[in-house]
Amino acid sequence: MLVSGSEDCTVKVWNLSSVASGPPSQRATEVDSVVTMRTHTQSVLALAVFSSENYPDCLPGKSGAFASAGRDGALHLFQLPSIENDKPEPHTYEEYEGVKLHSIKDAHDDAVWDLHAHPLSNVLFSAGADGVVRTWGVTSGMSTSEKLTLQGELRCATKTNTNGTGPNNQGFLVPTSVQSMLTDPKTCVVGYTNGSIAQFDFAAERVIQLTRAIDVDTKGRGGQVNKVSLNYIVIVIIVVKLTALFIDLTACVILKLTVHPTMPIAIAAHQDRKIRMYDMRAGKTNVDDKDPKLILIHDINVSLFQWYR
């Protein structure tokens, strides 16, 4: 199953089983969406999927749940259709309503840049342009009508943190991405528009550390962290370099940050063609890979790097 969000304010679920299975000559070249949800009023910017194992009391025959968020600041939770039982569109009104689980129109006061479903629990993270990362408890079943419950708020103040200089919203750094760390499941890492990376104890709503490379530019949004992600098998960095229309090509923007699944190491790919490796235990950059074969990225191209310990 594939879930996609678009600038046309829709969220679609796709069944790719006909594309991925069978001999190549018999695989489908085109597929129709299983369901299309039109609950957002502005562009959809973030999605997160909960497996049936992490979604409490998942209904029989369902595959779990997924959440969506976007520029409208709203947060929506949906039932993930099953591969075997759900038919392609169109559906009846009652069938569409059955997919909807819960909606919070004012989950954030500004755009929601990222969502993350904790891989070991039913906690949902949302990073908003209003300067806060919120944690939500996701529930299911018929016991409660509130499927999304606010559990906590993670903020990083500019005045109380050494690496807190740069763009902020009312004195708090602006998060762009959030990801949990499997080496310490009670913590998460958050990327900010000033290029800093914070580690939180999200249960206690406490900043453990805020780190940033010495040479990261903090003027304007030059050091912006655009995405924090977790790879469960190998460390793979995929960098999409945008044109100068959107991002200053001379800046130190972090385009991608991945966290090692078994070690407290974060690897960041920057706009300045550098790949920096952060030791989250020491809170500093310990490796700076400057090999031109690895750091050279071209506009609109996708480059793949693999790191071996």
Image (spheres, rainbow, N blue to C red):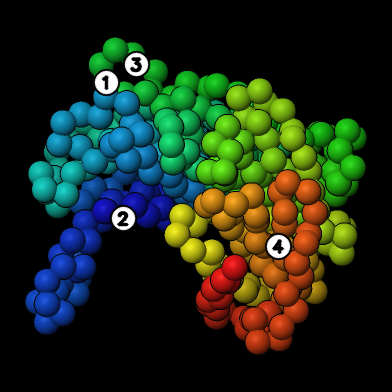
Instruction: Tell me the SS state at disc 2.
Output: strand
Instruction: Tell me the SS state at disc 1.
Output: loop
Tag 4 residue: 277
Residue 14 appears in which quarter of the rendering?
bottom left
Q: Crowdedness of circle 3 by 10 Å Cα count: few (<14), some, many (20+)? A: few
Q: Indicate the amino acid at tag 3.
A: Ser
Q: Which numbered disc, 1 or 3, marks the residue closer to the eye?
A: 1
Residue at 43 percent across and 36 percent down: it is: 120
The reply to whether the C-beta atoms of the residues labelled 2 and 3 are less than 8 Å apart is no
Q: Indicate the amino acid at tag 1.
A: Gly
Q: Crowdedness of circle 4 by 10 Å Cα count: few (<14), some, many (20+)? A: many
Alpha carbon of mark 4 to alpha carbon of mark 2: how far?
31 Å
Which quadrant holds the C terminus?
bottom right
Residue at 60 percent across and 52 percent down: it is: 263
Q: Residue furthest front?
A: 309
User: Relative to 88, is 63 above or below?
Assistant: above
Q: Indicate the amino acid at tag 4.
A: Met
> Of label 2 and label 3, which has the lower sequence position?
2
